[in-house]
């Protein structure tokens, strides 16, 4: 009703609005604040009589609303607010807008210092003037207004062959033909839809095809055609992509039309003063400053668009419709590559099904003729969504779950899984002040400015454009693929091994293609921003783990991508910086893992000659860097060490190089701290120790002890396993214990390891792996006794909660509400023929997933909390800080400070009563309200008694918090290898 | 079994191996219980005979429940390309399969859910005889909890194991179908029945065959026929007709057929 009212209000038809009000009443609904806003807007537009306005305001008050609320809560677009205000002033000429709400401050005990006004320090400045930042913002805005950006790929430096020129010409002709035929098909389908009178599936789509000029739709369809890989793509993926491209385009238009963009622009230009070097220092956080500016400008909540997200099914339907148009409209003459064939038009895209045991997947594949032309043309322009490129100006700070990151592109604070919307609702219900710490942490990560390590990028591109190098993780071009085995004319005439060879070849080329394209995207984007300073806006997953938004090129990428990233800000190395660079280098090699820091440093000094040789002659010298774990980062580090050590005063050398500190088995660290497990804490380096401890070896040792005992007692399988128990065998299982690996999965892992050992007798595989996994679990139980208890408690609690028909929810110590988005899959048929939208079914939790995923998710929510706390406190100390989950980056100068903060925050976090708080939260959440129990179908519904029994069981489970051990948490402060 | 062999004066010969892991696609040495069919047949002393000759060997067994579907596809593929056990002629299988798979193998057009690509291909390939049905409870299974490993079935009845005799058709390769082009036939049937309710003409059109209507008319298949309404024999005739048009020579079709082989044999 409100949507229709708003439209009439825009047209000034008060009579229609009055009709709608009576309709509301007749169906027993009451007008909401938005209904009154629409009515008043209309009156303001019409300059209605005092009496009419007065009556409306009176009715508003009678319904329990207040005039001020209109301006505090309604999301106004365009001139709506002015019109409402005008209407109000007809009856109250002196009416003043309500003052903006007072900013609230987060009360979390973990952040008392951080948010205290007395200790507030000025926000760190960037090395840019206001003017420069505003120009960059303009560039960013222009890029986003175009929605897509087309850049030169790094392959464009290769010379053009005559064949390529010919193919490009052909492709250009074809594309213009396709453009016309797609346009025609679109118009035709729209026309036939508009004729339909009944409510059918087609009619549902029709309005969505009229949102923008036809050309926009055609452009989006052509884009999809250009990016289709020769192997084809699943129907569902393509449909979703098409649907969301249209949605994004539409949102951009709406933001333009509703003047939302103008407002953002206005605020941003002021906001930039906080960060620019030539303005007065302000003691604000980015979020606070933005909120202050918004309040001062009187925009209130109107910076947010009214909710207009499209349901998943709609995106899919729309996408399917476009795909079908593409399949029908895009054709190519069959003889285009071979003039001897008859000139017949054949479709460029076709449907085909692929079968994977019992699954079948619908695919869209391009015709080989098309793939051939595209590959011949070797086009060197790449088109990306503007959100795939790092931002050219500091991101818009997150101020709410809907607002932040890019200037225009719609970005969600929390990434969603499979169309689940529960977490979004949860965030909306959460008091905004509770989200402040999380928003501030994300803003802090996003505000880190980056630049490109050009020498390293150039070396990588030179290898990429030459023949690639699989060992160095530079994917070779398809031309380097092994020759295809002689293909027989008919698939069945070849024998088994030929066939096998052919299949391997096909698999290999498909893999090569996707790896190559992935690297091409990353390197091309890096190359595009090679002379620029850029930013990665961040958001998070449902557990609060943070991720940069641009998908291809970011610091979470592989060795190659990480090696080409530098902090834009430089800091002197200081007295210990060079040593940290050297230790960092040794860490990157993967050598000396079990040695003390001092020994790693000594080792680096010993091989200084190799390091300098690698830096000076990376491709022609002795190539020491190539044989390390992370060769490209190692090379970049060699170059940095060379430059620093050769500078007259290394301590004054300005370094942009990020130095990493890694948590050692971070999941187990959190478990050990939660459970205060003494032995466990020692083995994951929570206790100070002269050399780093290795939890995998420790578990292997423990298992070996068990085995010996059993062997002595004559257990056959224990005897068979003599000499086979080692670190390698147990490593994967220990690592995945944190992530909830079950005995079943653990046994499979063991079996795999044992299979790799040639001498191990095959007939004992099952028994041995079964025995080993049991002993590993026992070993972990012995070492991390409280850990297992905690894990079991979490699992059991989740099981009971899910069985009672609810999803598992909790709140992190930083106040972020979390809900596990696992529901029983509801298969949805995506078909363009499907006429009626199915009614949305209630979401039922997936019990198994809710249960098994709770422990790892809970731990992840803790590690993300630890990271955010570290990020915020690093900000207070003026450090540059970014993270790759449990790997923290900062300048060489500030590694020591960061290490200290990281430990402090870990201690602070685990000094909270985390499990107690969780228990209390869940008791409140799950044991107060009446519950609904999902019994297996067929059994009779539970009586009141059984229900009470369940309630009691759940209550007992949730209150029964596991006991903890004797580990003294403070010890972490002095542990060198906690993060190293 | 070994002691049985010893006491039977050469009437029984025991060879260790898993019949359902014959001729694995992966290269490298074949370790028991997997084995190669040529070795097995050599040890058994069975020589290859022409396709139209009498059944050269009879095989009895129980299909492993866990991978029933997969095994049926593998056997089917071997049958159509005359490889593995079918290299020696029309090997006769006498196997216990679950009732629900039996329903699929013998389903008639229009039987919703049951009539699938597997039905068409087995019916074209073999004579299917039901020898005996036996309730699940008669069997001992090796499940850890001692229960029966009865595969779950929602749509089809599944209360028995069915002893089924599968005898390859003598005339399987007398028409246009050959061991060399049978992969294309299998591919075609699978693609058609991937969406049983879709119309055949739509399928033919999406394969860029523009004379589809004429072809169907000649085969006396109604223009709006759905894929699930066609008899196995119709599919065979459709294939032979398409073989004569030159559709299968289109490169993409050739590639797709190859792809499908991979998916079946893995």
Image (cartoon, grey):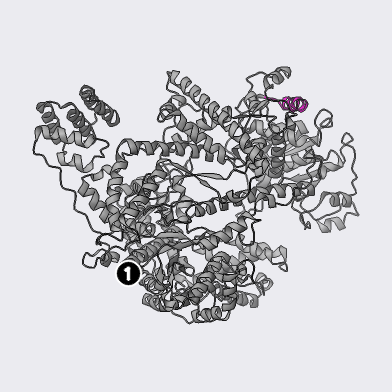
Residue A117 is left or right of residue A911, and the answer is left
Residue A590 is left or right of residue A55, and the answer is right
In terms of image quadrants, where is residue A324?
top right
Q: Which residue is mark 1?
A: A877
In the displayed structure, B147 sits above or below A305; it is below
Residue A813 position in % (x across, y down): 33, 61
SS under mark 1: loop
In terms of image quadrants, where is residue A203?
top left
Write down the chain letter for disc 1. Answer: A
In the displayed structure, A211 sits above or below A535; it is above
Along the line of sight, the residue nearer the viewer: A322 or A607: A607
Q: How many marks?
A: 1
In the displayed structure, A355 sits above or below A280; it is above
- First to last magenta residue range: B230-246
Q: Looking at the rendering, in which quadrant would you find the N terminus of chain A?
A: top left
Along the line of sight, the residue nearer the viewer: A898 or A109: A898
Is residue A737 visible in the rendered image? The answer is yes
Residue B228 position in % (x across, y down): 64, 27
Along the line of sight, the residue nearer the viewer: A850 or A547: A547
Residue A960 position in % (x across, y down): 37, 63
Residue A503 is left or right of residue A527, and the answer is right
In terms of image quadrants, where is residue A19?
top left
Main SS category, magenta section = helix
Residue A93 position in % (x across, y down): 9, 36
């Amino acid at each position: 009703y409100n949507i229709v009212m708003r439209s009439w209000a825009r047209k000034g038809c008060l009579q229609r609005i009055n009709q709608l009000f009576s309709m509301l009443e007749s169906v027993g609904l009451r007008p909401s604040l938005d209904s009154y806003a629409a009515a008043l807007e209309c009156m303001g537009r019409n300059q209605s009589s005092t009496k009419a306005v007065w009556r409306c305001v009176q009715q508003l008050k009678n319904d329990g609303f207040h005039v001020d609320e209109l301006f505090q809560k309604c999301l106004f677009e365009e001139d709506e607010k002015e019109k409402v205000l005008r209407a109000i002033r007809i009856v109250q000429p002196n009416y003043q807008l309500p003052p903006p709400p007072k900013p609230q401050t987060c009360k979390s005990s973990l952040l008392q210092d951080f948010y205290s006004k007395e200790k507030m320090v000025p926000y760190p400045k960037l090395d840019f003037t206001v003017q420069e930042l505003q120009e960059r913002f303009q560039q960013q805005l222009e890029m986003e207004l175009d929605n897509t950006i087309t850049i030169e790929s790094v392959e464009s430096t290769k010379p053009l062959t005559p064949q390529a020129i010919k193919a490009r010409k052909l492709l250009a002709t074809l594309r213009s033909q396709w453009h016309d035929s797609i346009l025609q098909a679109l118009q035709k389908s729209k026309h036939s839809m508009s004729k339909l009178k009944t409510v059918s599936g087609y009619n549902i789509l029709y309005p969505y095809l009229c949102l923008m000029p036809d050309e926009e739709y055609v452009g989006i369809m052509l884009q999809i055609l250009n990016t289709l890989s020769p192997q084809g793509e699943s129907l569902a993926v393509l449909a979703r992509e098409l649907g969301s491209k249209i949605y994004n385009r539409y949102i951009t238009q709406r933001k333009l039309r509703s003047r939302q963009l103008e407002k953002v622009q206005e605020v941003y230009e002021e906001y930039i003063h906080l960060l620019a070097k030539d303005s007065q220092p302000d003691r604000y956080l980015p979020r606070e400053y933005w909120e202050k500016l918004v309040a001062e400008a009187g925009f209130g909540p109107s910076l947010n668009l009214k909710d207009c997200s499209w349901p998943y099914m709609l995106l899919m339907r729309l996408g399917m419709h476009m795909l079908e148009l593409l399949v029908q409209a895009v054709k190519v003459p069959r003889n285009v590559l071979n003039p001897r064939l008859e000139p017949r038009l054949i479709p460029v895209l076709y449907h085909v099904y692929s079968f994977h045991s019992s699954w079948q997947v619908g695919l869209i594949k391009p015709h080989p003729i098309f793939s051939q032309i595209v590959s011949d043309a070797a086009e060197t322009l790449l088109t990306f969504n503007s959100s795939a490129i790092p931002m050219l100006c500091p991101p818009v700070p997150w101020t709410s779950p809907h607002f932040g990151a890019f200037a225009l592109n719609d970005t969600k604070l929390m990434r969603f899984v499979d169309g689940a919307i529960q977490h979004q609702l949860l965030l909306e219900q959460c008091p905004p002040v509770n989200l402040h710490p999380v928003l501030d942490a994300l803003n802090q990560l996003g505000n880190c400015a980056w630049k490109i390590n050009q020498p390293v990028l150039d070396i990588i591109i030179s290898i990429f454009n030459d023949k690639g190098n699989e060992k160095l993780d530079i994917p070779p071009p398809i031309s380097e693929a092994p020759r295809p085995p002689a293909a027989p004319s008919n698939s069945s005439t070849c024998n088994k091994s030929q066939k096998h060879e052919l299949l391997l070849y096909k698999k290999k080329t498909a893999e090569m293609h996707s790896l190559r394209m992935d690297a091409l995207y990353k390197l091309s984007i890096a190359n595009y921003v090679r002379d620029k300073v850029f930013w990665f806006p961040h958001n998070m997953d449902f557990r609060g783990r943070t991720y940069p938004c641009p998908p291809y090129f970011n610091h979470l990428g592989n060795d190659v991508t990480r090696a080409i990233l530098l902090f834009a800000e430089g800091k002197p190395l200081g007295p210990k910086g060079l040593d940290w660079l050297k230790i960092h280098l040794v860490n990157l090699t993967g050598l000396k893992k079990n040695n003390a820091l001092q020994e790693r440093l000594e080792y680096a000094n010993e091989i200084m000659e190799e390091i300098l040789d690698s830096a000076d002659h990376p491709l022609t010298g002795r190539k020491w860097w190539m044989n390390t774990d992370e060769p490209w980062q190692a090379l970049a580090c060699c170059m940095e060490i060379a430059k620093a050590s050769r500078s007259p005063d290394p301590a004054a050398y300005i370094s942009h190089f990020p130095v990493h500190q890694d948590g050692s088995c971070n999941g187990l660290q959190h478990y050990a701290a939660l459970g205060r497990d003494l032995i466990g804490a020692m083995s994951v380096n929570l206790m100070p120790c002269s050399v780093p401890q290795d939890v995998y070896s420790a578990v292997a040792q423990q298992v070996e002890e068990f085995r010996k005992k059993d062997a002595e007692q004559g257990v056959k399988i224990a005897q068979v396993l003599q000499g086979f128990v080692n670190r390698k065998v147990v490593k994967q299982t220990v690592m995945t214990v944190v992530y909830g690996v079950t005995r079943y999965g653990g046994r499979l892992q063991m079996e795999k390891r044992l299979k790799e050992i040639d001498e191990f007798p095959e007939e004992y595989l099952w028994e041995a792996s079964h025995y080993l996994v049991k002993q590993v679990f026992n070993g972990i139980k012995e070492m991390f006794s409280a850990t297992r208890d905690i894990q079991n408690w979490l699992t059991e609690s989740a099981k009971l909660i899910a069985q009672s028909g609810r999803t598992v929810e909790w709140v992190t110590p930083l106040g972020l509400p979390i809900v596990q988005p696992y529901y029983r899959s509801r298969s949805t048929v995506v078909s363009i023929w499907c006429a009626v939208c199915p009614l949305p079914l209630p979401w039922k939790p997936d019990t198994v997933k809710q249960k098994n995923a709770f422990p790892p998710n809970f731990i992840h929510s803790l590690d993300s909390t630890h990271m955010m706390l570290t990020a915020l406190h690093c900000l207070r100390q003026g450090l540059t800080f970014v993270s790759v989950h449990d790997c923290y980056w900062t300048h060489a100068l500030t590694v020591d400070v960061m290490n200290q903060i990281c430990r402090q925050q870990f201690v602070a976090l685990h000094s909270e009563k985390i499990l107690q708080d969780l228990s209390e939260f869940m008791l409140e959440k799950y044991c107060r309200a009446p519950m609904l129990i999902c019994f297996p179908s067929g059994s009779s519904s539970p009586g009141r008694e059984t229900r009470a029994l369940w309630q009691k069981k759940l209550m007992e489970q949730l209150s029964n918090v596991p006991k903890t051990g004797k580990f003294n948490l403070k010890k972490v402060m002095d542990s060198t290898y906690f993060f190293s | 079994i070994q002691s049985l062999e010893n006491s039977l004066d050469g009437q029984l010969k025991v060879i260790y191996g898993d019949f359902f892991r014959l001729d694995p696609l992966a290269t490298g040495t074949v370790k028991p219980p997997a084995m190669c069919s040529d070795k097995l047949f050599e040890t058994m002393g069975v020589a290859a005979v022409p396709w139209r000759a009498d059944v050269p060997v009879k095989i009895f067994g129980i299909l492993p429940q866990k991978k029933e579907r997969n095994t049926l596809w593998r056997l089917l593929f071997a049958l159509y390309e005359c490889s593995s056990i079918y290299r020696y002629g029309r090997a006769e299988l006498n196997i216990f399969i679950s009732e629900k798979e039996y329903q699929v193998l013998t389903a008639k057009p229009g039987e919703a859910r049951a009539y699938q690509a597997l039905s068409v291909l087995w019916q074209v390939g073999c004579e299917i005889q039901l020898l005996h049905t036996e309730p699940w409870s008669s069997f001992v299974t090796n499940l850890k909890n001692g229960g029966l490993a009865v595969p779950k079935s929602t749509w089809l009845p599944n209360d028995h194991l069915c002893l089924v005799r599968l005898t390859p058709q003598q005339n399987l390769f007398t028409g246009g179908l050959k061991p060399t082009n049978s992969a294309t036939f299998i591919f075609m049937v699978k693609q058609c029945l991937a969406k049983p309710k879709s119309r055949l003409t739509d399928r033919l059109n999406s394969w860029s065959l523009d004379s589809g209507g004429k072809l169907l008319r000649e085969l006396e298949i109604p223009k709006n026929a759905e894929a699930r309404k066609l008899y196995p024999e119709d599919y065979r005739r459709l294939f032979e007709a398409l073989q004569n048009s030159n559709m299968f020579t289109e490169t993409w079709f050739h590639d797709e057929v190859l792809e499908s082989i991979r998916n079946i044999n893995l």
